[in-house]
Image (tube, rainbow, N blue to C red):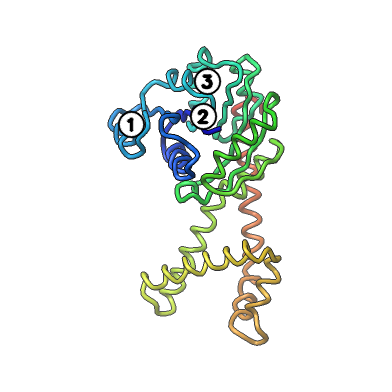
Amino acid sequence: MPSRKIGVIGAGNMGTALLRGILASKWGRKPNLFASHPKKPKAAALARELGIRVIGQNLEVARKADVLILAVKPQILESVLTEIRPALRDGQLLISIAAGFPTHQIESILGAPVSVIRAMPNVAAVVSLSATVLCLGRHAKSPHAAEARRIFESIGTVVELPEYQLDAVTGLSGTGPMYIFQIIEGLSDAGVRVGLSRDVSTALTIQTVLGAARMAQVLKTHPGILKDLVTSPGGTAIAALHSLERNRLRAILMDAVEVATARSKELGQARSGKT
C-alpha cells in the first residue's frame, strides 16, 4: 500500500485530518499523496503545511490516485462524481464520506463496476480519535476493505458494518461528539454554579470525561460495573445518580440517538427520491 497513490477530493476539515493522519502514521509517502481544494490560498497553505501537491482540479486528482477519497458535502457529491467519472479506471478504489449517500447510488451515477466503500468518521478525526465505520459496496472486496481500514485507522478506531446499519451509526457516533460537548458544557456550568472558576471547572470536567472514557476502553468492563465502583453506600455519587435517574438522563440520550437516526434515514430517502 505505501506505493499506492492516495487522492483526497475536498481537503476541508475531514479531508485534511485524513491527510495528516496518513502522514503521521509514517506509511504514507508525501510524493504519493494528492488533494484538491477549490480556493487557491487555502490550497497553497495546505501544500506548504503538509508538503504534498494540492491542486484545484478534481479530475487531475482522480486521474493520479489509486485510492480516491471523496471528502465533499453530500449535496455536491453527485456533481463531483459526474465530473470525475471519465478519469475512473479498473483497480481504483473510491471511498466516500458523504452522509446519506448510499453506495448503490454512487455506483449508479458512475455507471461502471467501480469498487466503492462508504465511510462514516466523526469530527474527532481532527485529533486522530475518530470512530469510523466502513461499509462495502457491491464490487468492493476484502483487499479494498483492508486498504480503507488502514487509512482510517490513522485517525482513530475502525469498525466494518453492513450499510443498512449506517443510519444508526450516524445517530450514535456520527452525531455523538455533540452529545459529549453538551455534557461537558453542562458539567462545567455545574462547577461554576457550586463555586468553581470557569477555567478550573472546564479543566476538571474535560479530564474527568477523558479519564472515565479511558477506563472504559482499557478495562473493557460494563459501564454499569464501573458506575458501581464510584457509588459507595450513602455517598455523594449515589445521591447524584438518583437525581440523574429521576431526570431521565439515559432516556434523554437514547431519545437523542433515536431521533438523529430517524433524521439520517429521512435525508437518505429524500436524496434517493423516495417519499
Query: Residue placed at 62% from the left, 31% from the top?
Result: 117
Badge 1 amino acid: Ala
Look at mark 3 in the image and give the residue it sits on. Answer: 81
Cα distance in 3D space between marks 1 and 2: 24 Å
**Which element carries disc 2, helix, strand or loop?**
loop
CA gap, disc 3 and disc 2:
25 Å
Q: Nearer the viewer, mark 3 or mark 1?
A: 1
Q: Which image quarter holds the N terminus? A: top right
Foreground label between 1 and 2: 2
Q: Is residue 56 left or right of residue 234?
A: left
Callout 1: SS: helix
Given residues 136 and 53, the one toward you in this image is 53
Instruction: Give the alpha-carbon distance from disc 3 to disc 1, as whole Å.
Output: 21 Å
Q: Earlier in the sequence, mark 3 or mark 2?
A: 2
Question: Quick one: label 1, few (<14), some, or many (20+) residues within 10 Å?
Answer: many
The percent position of residue 16, horizontal first and vertical second, equals 42, 39
Q: Amino acid at mark 3?
A: Leu
The answer to whether residue 151 is above or below residue 115 is below
Residue 261 in percent (x, y) is at 64, 44
170 relative to 76 in the view: left or right = right
Total numbered labels placed on residues in the image: 3
Q: Is tag 3's residue or tag 1's residue first in the polypeptide sequence?
A: 1
To which quarter of the image does residue 241 belong?
A: bottom right
Question: Residue under circle 1?
Answer: 43
